[in-house]
Amino acid sequence: MNFAKEETMNDEKRKILIVEDDSFVLDIYQTKLTQEGFEVIAAANGMEALGKLEKEKPDLILLDIIMPYVDGLEVLKKVRSMDQLKDVPIILLANLSQKEEVDQGMTLGANDYLIKSHFTPSEVLKKINKYLK
């Protein structure tokens, strides 16, 4: 028997996809979540995120709204229409001025939204853990 392999399978890291076009913000969250033991999949825009979602299923998605190529709301619509991903929790990351987009995102099926300037990475981590329980 190979107990080491069994242990690894049960001890699999939770995957979080972060979709954020601001490389500084992306780096902060990527560092924080990696330190907390998560496997982080990073995408700099919606198009890149959709490509990664074809190959991997994250346990949670942190999704910026305003991005080049494909915006967060379009990514949200596509994810919610995919059978294998429709139940993945999605937290929108917004700037204060995006109230209409946030409302639309909640209507489209986002689980929560966070205004970037109002939450520290540690507070965002608490929200993530709430949805992964």
Image: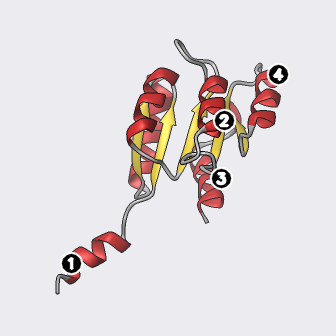
Residue kind at label 4, given as amino acid type: Glu
* Circles 3 and 2: CB atoms closer than 8 Å: no
Quadrant showing the C terminus? bottom right
Q: Which numbered disc, 4 or 1, marks the residue that appears first in the sequence?
A: 1
Q: Distance between the residues labelled 3 and 2?
A: 11 Å
Residue kind at label 2, given as amino acid type: Leu
**Residue 98 horizontal side relative to residue 61, left or right:** right
Q: Which numbered disc, 3 or 2, marks the residue that appears first in the sequence?
A: 2
- Residue at x 47%, y 30% (from the top left corner): 49
Point out the frontmost of discs 3 and 2.
Answer: 2
Quickly name the residue at label 4.
Answer: 100
Q: How far apart are marks 4 and 1 (CA)?
A: 50 Å
* Circles 4 and 2: CB atoms closer than 8 Å: no
Which label is found at residue 92? Answer: 2
Which label is found at residue 127? Answer: 3
Residue kind at label 3, given as amino acid type: Lys
Instruction: Characterize the local packing of mark 1: few (<14), some (14-19) or many (20 or more) Cα atoms within 10 angstroms.
Output: few
Q: Is residue 114 visible?
A: yes
Instruction: Characterize the local packing of mark 4: few (<14), some (14-19) or many (20 or more) Cα atoms within 10 angstroms.
Output: few
Quickly name the residue at label 1.
Answer: 4
